[in-house]
Image (cartoon, rainbow, N blue to C red):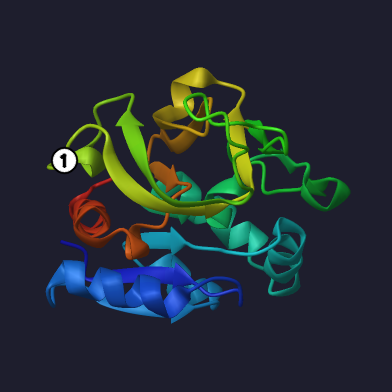
Amino acid sequence: MANRVAIIDYGMGNIHSVAKALEFAAGGGARIDITHDAARIRRAERVVLPGVGAIRDCMAEIARLGLDEVIHEVAQNKPFLGICVGMQALFEQSEENDGTACLGILPGEVLAFRTDMTDPVSGERLKIPHMGWNQVHQEINHPLWQGIEQDTRFYFVHSYYVVPTDENLTAATTCYPDPFSSAVARGNIFAVQFHPEKSQRAGLALYANFLRWDGQ
C-alpha cells in the first residue's frame, strides 16, 4: 500500500472529505498529504486531482499556482486519480464558461447536458445538474473495480460530462438518459465523474483499490 498520497490542493473541491475517505480506506497504511507544493506532489507515490465548481475557475487556479507542469508530469508516471471536475480538467477542452482550455492530458472534450432531456420511462424532464445516485456500468476490467459489483450505484453532482476522442478510454458508463463516460482509464491514469467520498461503501472500496494499485 502507498505510504504517501498527494491530494492536489488548488482551492477547488471538497478536499478534506476526499482526504478523510482515503485515510479511512487506508486504515493507517498511508500518509495523506493535501498540498499544492510541486516538490511534495512529486515525492508522493500516488496523486489525486479532485475538483468541484466551474472549470474556468479550476483551470485559472491551477495556472495561478503553477501546477500545470507537475500535473502533466505525475500523470505520466504515478498512479493518478481524477475526481469530478478533476476528471474533466484532464481533457482538452470544455464548453463550460463559453469554452475553456483544459490540461489536454487525455484526448476529448467536455460537453453540457442538454436542458430538454426527459426520463424514457416517466417522460418527466430530467434535472440539471445530474445529482444523486446512479448506476455505473463497468466497460473494462480494471484493478480499481476489484470487489465492486457491476452496476453499483455511485453519487454524482455535475452538469457536464466528458466525451473521449478514443472510445477505448471509457472504463465505465452511466445513463442520464443516454450513456456517458462516467469513468476513464489510460495507463496509470484513472478518473471518475462521480464522487467516491460521497458513495459510501462502494466509494471506499474504489479508494482502497487505488491505494493498492501500482498503475499497471
* Residue displayed at 41% across by 80% down: 16
Please give left or right for residue 99 compared with residue 197 in the image: right
| Residue 99 image offset from top left, x and y in percent | 84, 45
- Note whether residue 78 is visible: no
Camera-nearest residue between 38 and 174:
174
Q: Residue at x 21, y 70 (%)?
A: 3
Q: How many numbered markers are drawn?
A: 1
SS class, disc 1: loop
What residue is at 53 percent from the left and 25 percent from the top?
Answer: 178
**Residue type at the position of mark 1:** Gln
Q: Which residue is mark 1?
A: 146
Image height check: is 21 above or below 101?
below
Q: Is residue 152 visible?
A: yes
Q: Which of these two is toward me, 94 or 176? A: 176
Residue 38 spot, x, y in % from top left: 54, 72
Residue 72: x and y in percent read: 58, 51
Question: In the image, residue 129 lies at what x, y percent?
Answer: 61, 51
Left or right side of 119 for 68: right
Query: Quadrant where the N terminus lies?
Result: bottom left
* Quarter that holds the C terminus: top left
Compared to residue 70, the image places residue 109 above or below, namely above
In the picture provided, is 183 more to the left or to the right than 56? left
